[in-house]
Image (cartoon, grey):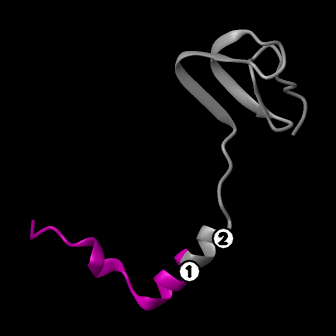
Amino acid sequence: MGEDASLDEFLNSESSEQSGAADADASTTTYAWSDGAATCGTCGEAVERRWQQAGDLVCVECKDWDRA
């Protein structure tokens, strides 16, 4: 096995142009986890896990799983 390759060896001008386009298409989170209790945006229950729904973070019981 040879020397480890630097990540810079895999970059070229084309890939840096493409990464700029990828940055424009930002990801959105669908799930949030809290080490302590956090409040559900619908029922107000203190929970650790919440999912995005209509701009709020909601608990598993309030999440409408049929919606896309």
Residue matched to label 2: 24
**Which mark, residue 1?**
none
Q: What residue do we see at 87% from left, 25% from top?
A: 64
Residue drawn where x is 10% and y is 70% of the image: 3
| Residue bounds of the magenta highlight | 1-19
Mark 2 neighbour density, 10 Å: few (under 14) some (14–19) many (20 or more): few
Magenta stretch encompasses residue 10: yes
Residue under numbered circle 1:
18
Q: Nearer the viewer, residue 33 or 2?
A: 33
Q: In the rendered image, which quarter is residue 55 located in?
A: top right
Q: Nearer the viewer, mark 2 or mark 1?
A: 2
Question: What amino acid is found at the position of numbered circle 2 in the picture?
Answer: Ala
Q: Is residue 7 above or below residue 11?
A: above
Name the outermost residue toward the left: 2
Please state the horizontal and vertical placement of residue 16, each as a whole percent of the image. Answer: 47, 82
Density class for disc 1 (Cα within 10 Å; few <14, some 14-19, many ≥20) is: few
Q: Is residue 51 in the magenta section?
A: no
Q: Identify which residue is drawn at 9% across, 70% down.
A: 2
Q: Is residue 59 left or right of residue 19?
A: right
Tell me which label, 2 or 1, sits earlier in the chain.
Answer: 1
Q: Quadrant of the N terminus?
A: bottom left
